[in-house]
């Protein structure tokens, strides 16, 4: 499952957990601008208890995506 976010959409862990409740049991690949990737990763880890080892991060400028 891949989610693409445009510039207007909020990139929050709440959205991810609501849209894809299976995220807790999935490997998450987060790709996009460094600030967005780092913020979403921290929120998933700190607020939702997703282990850091379950997150694969890729930083670049451009479109933001989350793949499960």
Image (tube, rainbow, N blue to C red):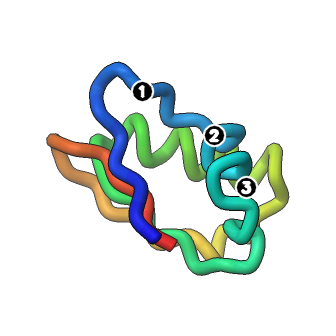
Horizontal side of 43 relative to 9 (left or right) equals: right
Residue under circle 3? 45
- Give the secondary structure at mark 2: helix
Q: Which mark is residue 15?
A: 2
Residue under circle 1? 9
Q: Residue furthest left?
A: 62
- Residue at the location (42% across, 26% down)? 9
- Give the secondary structure at mark 1: loop
Q: Residues within 10 Å of mark 2 (few under 14, many from 20)?
A: few
Tag 1 near tag 2, CB within 8 Å: yes
Q: CA distance from mark 1 to mark 3?
A: 21 Å
Please report whichever mark, 1 or 2, sits nearer to the chain's N-terminal start. 1
- Residue at the location (64% across, 47% down)? 42
Look at the picture and state if 51 lies above or below 37: below
Please report whichever mark, 2 or 3, sits nearer to the chain's N-terminal start. 2
Q: CA distance from mark 2 to mark 3?
A: 14 Å
- Residue at the location (65% across, 78% down)? 26
Q: CA distance from mark 1 to mark 2?
A: 10 Å
Quarter location, residue 52: bottom right
Q: Residues within 10 Å of mark 1 (few under 14, many from 20)?
A: few
Q: Residues within 10 Å of mark 3 (few under 14, many from 20)?
A: some
Q: How many marks?
A: 3
Horizontal side of 31 relative to 26 (left or right) equals: left
Q: Nearer the viewer, residue 11 or 39?
A: 11
Quarter location, residue 28: bottom right
Q: Nearer the viewer, mark 1 or mark 3?
A: 1
Give x and y (percent) for residue 44: 69, 51
Give x and y (percent) for residue 4: 34, 49
């Amino acid at each position: 499952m891949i989610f693409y976010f445009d510039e207007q959409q909020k990139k929050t862990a709440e959205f991810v957990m609501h849209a894809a409740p299976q995220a807790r049991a999935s490997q998450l690949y987060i790709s996009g601008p460094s600030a967005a990737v780092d913020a979403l990763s921290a929120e998933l880890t700190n607020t939702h208890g997703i282990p850091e080892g379950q997150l694969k991060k890729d930083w670049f400028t451009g479109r933001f995506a989350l793949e499960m």
